[in-house]
Image (spheres, helix red, strand yellow):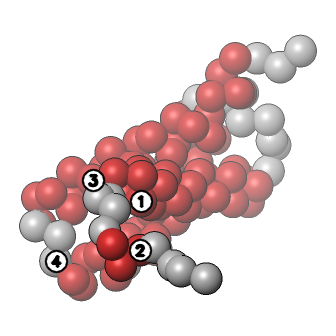
Amino acid sequence: MTNFTEFVTIPAIAAIVYTIIDMTKTALGGTEKFVRFIPLISCALGAILGTISFFFVPGVMETSNILVAIVIGAASGLSATGTNQVVKQLTKPKTTDDTTTE
């Protein structure tokens, strides 16, 4: 049976990246230049957090390879971008232009 900390590593990294990106976007006012680079920034933040968790919290990731920890962190960071888009699309008001007729 896996340890609970191994199970929550990916969602925890995604939540941290989501929070950092959202706070930064709010602080900068959502400038176009920043918004364009959000997926890249999320990926880099996730990779950094994956590396930090690999070295400073041993056993939290089920890997003994730093490259795998970086990839897991980067994928977790990118999942934060996907989560942002899901929330954005679910809270978007429905307009009459969104419906299609066949």
Type of the residue with mark 3: Asp
Considering only vertical position in the picture, is 48 above or below 40? above
Q: Nearer the viewer, mark 2 or mark 3?
A: 2
Q: How far apart are marks 2 and 4 (CA)?
A: 26 Å
Q: Position of residue 77 (x, y in %)?
A: 52, 56
Of labels 3 and 1, earlier in sequence is: 3
Q: Is mark 4 on a helix, strand or loop?
A: loop
Name which residue lies at 34% across and 62% down.
94
Residue at the extreme front: 102
Of labels 4 and 3, earlier in sequence is: 3
- The residue under label 2 is 98
Q: Nearer the viewer, mark 4 or mark 1?
A: 1
Of labels 2 and 1, earlier in sequence is: 1
Mark 2 is surrounded, within 10 Å at the Cα level, by few (under 14), some (14 to 19) or many (20 or more) other residues, namely few
Q: Is mark 1 on a helix, strand or loop?
A: helix
Can you see residue 48?
no
Q: In this view, does 26 lie to the left or right of 7?
A: left
Considering only vertical position in the picture, is 47 above or below 7? below
Q: Where the C terminus falls, by quadrant?
A: bottom right
- The residue under label 3 is 22
- The residue under label 4 is 31
Can you see residue 29?
yes
Q: Is mark 2 on a helix, strand or loop?
A: helix
Q: Is residue 41 left or right of residue 7?
A: left
